[in-house]
Amino acid sequence: MTALKLENVNKSFGSVHVLKDINLTVEDGEFVVFVGPSGCGKSTLLRVIAGLEDATSGTVAIGGDVVNAVPPAKRGIAMVFQSYALYPHLSVKDNMGLGLKQEGKSNAVVDERVSKASAMLDLDNYLTRRPAELSGGQRQRVAIGRAIVRDPKLFLFDEPLSNLDAALRMNTRVEIAALHRTLSASMIYVTHDQIEAMTLADKIVVLRDGRVEQVGSPMELYNNPANQFVAGFLGSPSMNFLSQSVTGLENGTTLGIRPEHLRFDANGQISGQVTHVERLGGDTNLLVKTDADEVLTVRLFGQDPTEVGDDVRLSYENANAFFFDQNGQRALPRAA
Amino acid sequence: MATPSKSGFKWHIVVFLAPAVIVYTAVMIYPLFATLRLSFYSEVEQERIWVGLQNFATLFGDAIWSEQFWNALGNNAWFFLIHMLVQNPIGIALAAILSSPKLRFSAFYRSAIFIPTILSFVIVGFAWKLILSPIWGIAPDMLDAIGLKFLYQPWLGKEEYALTTLSLVSVWQFVGIPMMLIYAALLSIPDEILEAGECDGITGLSAFFKIKLPLILPSIGIISVLTFVANFNAFDLIYAAQGALAGPDFSTDILGTFMYRTFFGFQLQLGDPHMGSTIASAMFGIILIGVCIYLFGIQRRLRNYQF
């Protein structure tokens, strides 16, 4: 069964066309991440799925039912907001239980579901506190708990980690992944952070300017990007694009090569000078300015003695090279 | 680097505070204490003498004085009650309607409802006297036009209606103030909280009562205390509409008009600054007690929410 099916969904705000012909399927139990630069429409798409915005055209089906005219609470979804959006005047327990009470569930059912969620999220000691008395990570967990108690067909996360600091972000990411395994629920997760996308997703949807650029598993997208945008967006440091520094490229064609696939080679065809070195301990990132005046990143594993100002020559395996035509679409590698 | 010595007296604090302290003292603190002081004196044979609490004893003990005082206080309490029960709920309801994103022309409604607030009391009192007048007012004709003429009463001229009518006129004039304060409080509630409510099925009226109302309670508390202070200090509208005698037969007499009549005199009644000050001191005490009850009894229990 499909948890979500979008068909030709369009959304306009006045004359601004934000979402353009989105077609997408989310299978049951799948963890789907919408990723893209800010303003690409990913949050709007999530809000259309939630029912907080109406699609201008097209159909939204959740669990097999078309829900275009169904209010958010009846769609079988639960949403976790970027700012958590907890009710400031209610305790943790009431925050989680309010939606169920509104549905008319009995107190026993509400208590049972809340205590189950709070045990799962380690919130038992905080049930009587108000949101103002909680840390950012705890508020985050309450927001997730509020979603869990509703037992939705589809979880929606709107950049839930962006207000947390780096260490907590990593922990929460692991928790969300664990939660997904425990609940085996369908989840849609919006982020602009490609690391979150790569680490969490079963399926990544890359969006740009309101269009789906590519859909696929993280490794499919990494190993086989459909176009230059996807290639550059996923992977950190991002892919190098060269059009001058290597010989034999057809006019307008761009060569893409990931930083980790470049290596020192005295006979390499790319030559340049190191302009900056980032030593991360486990990795060393070099910025190299080629003789053709293009800047590229080289990622070396481990520590490396290279200094700024050194002249280097680089090469790569042909199997790791990507080619893009002047429209940014994948081109076939030239016949060797 | 030169650091200011810790023991040195910080003159700049005095200099910066001085203008506000001087002005506030001259126009507020000094007159207040001068009035309180005046209430402990009386004038006998053109000479001011210290009488202690004698004036208060007269005000509360003497049958003629105390009857007027309790009448004014009772009327004032009714005046306040009408504002609390009519003005503030309507103000909150208007704010809730105005803050709905679906409402068109909301800026126009907001201005239109707020404009009476900036009108002079004299204009409001006079205009409503004309509107409600049984002789040349438009109220009887308008009721006649919709077949409800039998409902018409000379509202300002009947003892049982006059105070309520004037209270409602005051409500009409000032409903914009609670509306604006609540409107601002409602706008400060983040959209995401309301959207989270929407996902929980809390929309419309239940969104108002379960989410918005608890979050604007602190503003409602402030409005209540502002209403209390304004109502017990009220004077202008009654004076403009009914004069200092607050007719008919003192039925619209509130503490402000009672104090004015006593202090400055009116028609055959001679002015008595000492008894007038005594009434003013009593008003000050009543307002002080009311505000203290609010501050220590109610406001402490209200939480302010940071979003």
Image (tube, rainbow, N blue to C red):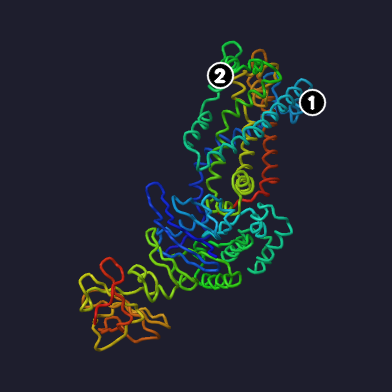
Does residue A250 appear left or right of residue A225 in this picture?
Answer: left
Q: Nearer the viewer, residue A131 or A144?
A: A144
Disc with the residue nearer the chain's start (2 vs 1): 1
Q: Say if B203 sits above or below A293 in the image.
A: above
Q: The disc labelled 2 sits on which kind of residue?
A: Phe
Q: Nearer the viewer, residue B6 or B189?
A: B189
Q: Residues within 10 Å of mark 1 (few under 14, many from 20)?
A: few
Q: Nearer the viewer, residue A308 or B28?
A: A308
Examine the rendering and report whether any part of residue B258 can be seen: no
Which subunit holds the residue at mark 1?
B
Q: Residues within 10 Å of mark 2 (few under 14, many from 20)?
A: some
State the residue at coordinates (25%, 80%): A273
Does residue B168 appear left or right of residue A294 in this picture?
Answer: right
Q: Position of residue A306 (x, y in %)?
A: 32, 85
Frontmost of labels 2 and 1 is: 2
Q: The disc labelled 1 sits on which kind of residue?
A: Gly
Q: Which residue is mark 1?
A: B61
Q: Say if B291 sits above or below B269 in the image.
A: below
Examine the rendering and report whether any part of residue B105 can be seen: yes
Q: Position of residue B230 (x, y in %)?
A: 61, 33
Q: Nearer the viewer, residue B204 or A128?
A: B204
State the residue at coordinates (20%, 79%): A247
Q: Say if B162 sits above or below A301 in the image.
A: above
Q: Which residue is mark 2?
A: B126
State the residue at coordinates (52%, 56%): A50
Quadrant the C terminus of chain B occupies? bottom right
In the rendered image, the residue lying farthest to the bottom is A266
Q: Give a yes or no on whether discs 2 and 1 share a subunit.
A: yes
Q: Position of residue A232 (x, y in %)?
A: 35, 70
Does residue B290 appear left or right of residue A29 in this picture?
Answer: right
